[in-house]
Amino acid sequence: MPMQAIIQHRYGTPDDLRLMEVEIPVPKPNEVLVKIHAAAVNDWELGLLEGKPLFMRLFLGLFRPKVKIMGCEIAGVIESVGGDIARFKPGDKVYGDLSASSFGAFAEYVCAREDAVMHMPSNLSFEQAAAIPHAAMLAQQALQDIAGMQQGQSLLINGAGGGVGTLAVQMAKLHKLGVTGVDSTAKQEYMTLLGFDRVIDYLQEDFTRTGKQYDLILDTKTSRSPFDYARALKPGGTYVTVGGSMPRVLQCLVFAKWISMTQKKTLRVLALKPNKGLNHFTGLIEAGKILPAIDSRFPLAEVPQALKHFASARHKGKVIISVASATDYDA
Ligand SMILES: NC(=O)c1ccc[n+]([C@@H]2O[C@H](COP(=O)([O-])OP(=O)(O)OC[C@H]3O[C@@H](n4cnc5c(N)ncnc54)[C@H](OP(=O)(O)O)[C@@H]3O)[C@@H](O)[C@H]2O)c1
């Protein structure tokens, strides 16, 4: 049986992607076949599309991408299960991050390892659910597992208006932290509405040079030297980066020990463990404590436009691909 999928034949730009018919995959014994209803766009896709940073081609394919169907966040319904699967049955609503399970979200169906999906929060639409697994686990693993956030602490989120920041601020407010958000001019009002106590426009003010210090910093867009970030931390404070400029992230790794010894401040780089902690997050959502922020929706055929919109960084919250309606659109 054929399905529609966005196929990547070579490294390039969103215009190199094609909507094509391919065979629906068949699940291995340890896999489930999911009919995808919604997917979400992440930084991963831009990296897979361009094959950058270049060293990643050692893993992604030297000259041509090994991953033909990109996309890592999905929400959908189990269509069938492999012989070893006991946790799921056809008809179950699931969501998850496929970045450790060979991607494949920009399609009507995907085979995923059993541990790559979880039961979906009962109170969310597929589009809302697709906005969560990858971004929320980056926020949760950074703020809870690494930084160990505590009530009353001050937190600054750099790159606060995107997928991770909009979930991270809700988690931090649940724990009663004071939260400052840093992003561009166009996102200041939106961030205030989301619940940030204070907002900073990075085009007007460099938060590392104001003299103000924070207990915790969560960075989704590392772009400065580790010594700048250390300056903005209180003694004993912790800076966690989840991504940004690769040379700057590497500098954090290199200088973390020195900064810890000389200034008693902690710099950490998060290596995401996909879906670890997602069950806990599902509970917070079902309790009505956290809601995903959706920027826009695109049909499957318009994944290239969605990627261009994401790359332009105008999005506030998550960019969603509405997959179930793919057949309503022409290629
Ligand atoms: N650690 C891991 O294992 C792992 C795995 C996967 C992904 N990641 C990383 O996790 C991050 C995901 O973040 P996300 O989904 O929230 O990204 P996002 O949705 O693109 O949001 C990033 C925000 O940062 C803003 N921004 C851009 N340049 C900035 C600057 N210099 N200073 C402050 N803000 C800036 C952007 O808006 P404007 O451009 O309008 O300012 C945008 O609102 C990415 O860096 C990704 O590479 C990490």
Image (cartoon, rainbow, N blue to C red):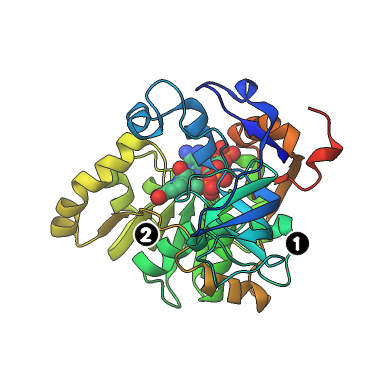
> Label 1 is placed on what type of residue?
Ser
In the rendered view, tell whether residue 120 sits above or below residue 183: below
Q: Position of residue 218 (x, y in %)?
A: 43, 56
Q: Position of residue 249 (x, y in %)?
A: 32, 42
Q: Name the mark on residue 125.
A: 1
Q: Position of residue 204 (x, y in %)?
A: 53, 39
Q: Name the mark on residue 213.
A: 2
Tell me if 65 is positioned left or right of 183 in this view. left
Tell me if 118 is positioned left or right of 217 in this view. right
Q: Nearer the viewer, residue 1 or 259?
A: 1
Count neighbours of disc 2 (C-alpha within 10 A) and say few if under 14, some if 14 to 19, many if 20 or more: many
Among the two numbered marks 2 and 1 on one chain, the one whose residue lies closer to the N terminus: 1
Q: What secondary structure is marked by label 2?
A: loop
Q: What secondary structure is marked by label 1?
A: loop
In the rendered view, tell whether residue 112 sits above or below residue 300: below
Mark nearer the viewer, 2 or 1: 1
Q: Nearer the viewer, residue 3 or 204?
A: 3
In the rendered view, tell whether residue 119 sits above or below residue 261: below
Q: Quadrant of the C terminus?
A: top right
> How much space separates mark 2 and mark 1, taking CA atoms?
39 Å
| Residue 205 appears in the rendering | no
Count neighbours of disc 1 (C-alpha within 10 A) and say few if under 14, some if 14 to 19, many if 20 or more: some
Q: Position of residue 129 (x, y in %)?
A: 67, 60
Q: Nearer the viewer, residue 254 or 201?
A: 254
